[in-house]
Amino acid sequence: MEMETTILFSLLISSSLFLLFYLSSFFHPKHSTTTPTPSTHPIIGNLIAFLHNRHRFFDWATQMLSDSPSNTINVRGPLFTSRGICTADPTNVDHLLKSNFSNYIKGDRFHSVLSELLGHGIFNVDGQLWSSQRKIASHEFNTRSLKSFVADTVRSETINRLLPTLISASNTNQIIDLQDIFRKFSFDNICNLAFGDDPACLDPSNSDTQPLFVQAFDEAVEICSARFMAPTPWVWKFKKLLRIGSERKLKQLIGIIDNYAMKIIESKKIKNKNDPDRDLLSRFMSTNQDSNLQDPIEKCKFLRDIIISFILAGKDSTSTALTWFFWLLSTNPKCEKRAYAEISEAMVEAQRRDGEILEYEELKSLNYLHAAITESLRLYPPVPIDSRVAVADDVMPDGTRVGAGWFADYSAYAMGRMERLWGKECLEFKPERWLDEYGTFVGVDQFRFPVFHGGPRVCLGKEMAYVQMKSVAAAVIYGFEVVGVREEMPTYVMSLTLKMDGGFPVRVSRRKY
């Protein structure tokens, strides 16, 4: 029965697209005189161009934005289902994320796609719901004890799991997927940090197994990502209504995810009596005791959404960033050599105190490594594109009109490849562009480099992410030589985060000191 429904649905889609394309031939496309638009047809909008470039969407968008005089383009969906703009202009990004912040919200376009997964978590809501969660998180992310806990958690996971895993691979000369290892490492880290739960994904004795929750979470993220990439929202909404295909699968996956989250919440209720406020979830639970959520079920839903939001923020983003960083380093031996020299110098001090890896203050002194990671983020931002919805009519600083209800996207991926922003060598990996004449790291305006977003919604975990990435990078670079085994240029997966397609197969070998 399901197969017959799926076939009928496919035929309906094909017939509708053919009819729309046929009807479009009777009209002449209208283009904006100020802001360019991709190849557009009446009724079906940019659908044909989108389908043709769907597999390389971020590079396609980069090309169009780069060719636009204003680095901004108009976008039109089929059947008038959506309309909006996409920009790579820092002034426009400032306008979206800060100057006119109140006019640009996540909106229903974002919320509907991720509602099953994120619920009312901080990344999926606006207004008071967002403000209250942001206030709690902002306070906790700025406490000294939490920063220390982050450093301790990362250090323990690195020494006890990551390094032994790489040593084993080196001893056996086996090819390993470094992206998968970083993904497991990041998941263990975020669960320990945020919930005090240890899934032990990277435990050497547990290397061939993976918790059911991790598989369910990854599959759910991919299905939600596919919703964003659907030609029109009614494609996935129709499948959801009929409970077929990926939408039926998503419902099953969310059940697994909910069960995992509820087990964590129940365990925290017991543990917090003896060890309060040790992790982020405990702090949210203690802060939430005096909130307006009096219904126990609503409180559990709130905490469930907090858990899933933290996992989404801390799992794939950091592992993705580390994957592309080590690929870039493996293809730029001079940069790898300079990073190793800087880390080796810092390790002299660490070894004087019998330390196995660098501590928080020592990591801060690694200017070149910080620059190299930042340069990698410029070229391969974990979140390649972000979206907002306009509440009211507006005009961007470059003169682009935005109608009420339109989406307004900005692409960090495209901005990192703009010659106007980074010069003729914008596609080259050059950590030196982030260093001054004394070798000290120098940042740039957050709206020119919106990898961690900007304005009131700027990423609270930015410093923590750098601590984790620098700690892992320093430990791996100091102890091992990493050589990629694939010959072709890696490509990305079309997902919420810029994961490397097919993983990152490498061989690692111990350094000879």
Image (cartoon, grey):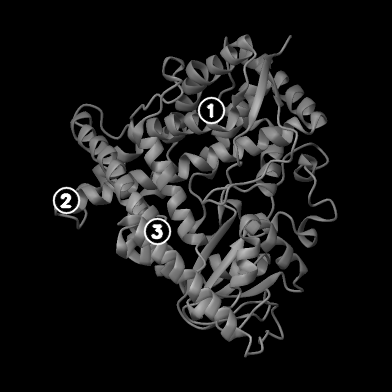
Q: Amino acid at mark 2?
A: Ile
CA gap between label 3 and label 1 equals 28 Å
Q: Nearer the viewer, residue 356 or 242?
A: 242
Q: Amino acid at mark 3?
A: Asn
What is the x, y in percent for residue 207? 46, 20
What is the x, y in percent for residue 134? 39, 54
| Residue at disc 3, secondary structure | loop
Looking at the image, which residue is at 50% across and 67% down?
A: 388
Please report contact status of discs 3 and 2: CB closer than 8 Å, yes or no: no
Q: Amino acid at mark 1?
A: Ile
Pointer 1: what residue?
181
Left or right of residue 256, residue 445 in this image? right
Give the mark nearer the N terminus: 3 vs 2.
Answer: 3
Nearer to us: label 3 or label 1: 1
- Is 485 located above or below residue 229 in the figure? above
Label 1 environment density (alpha carbons within 10 Å; few <14, some 14–19, many ≥20):
many
Is residue 194 in view?
A: no
Q: Nearer the viewer, residue 99 or 412?
A: 412
| Residue at disc 1, secondary structure | helix
Q: In the rendered image, which quarter is residue 335 located in? A: top right
Quadrant for the C terminus, please.
Answer: top right
Looking at the image, which residue is at 84% across and 51% down?
A: 425
Pointer 2: what residue?
297
Q: Which mark is residue 124?
A: 3
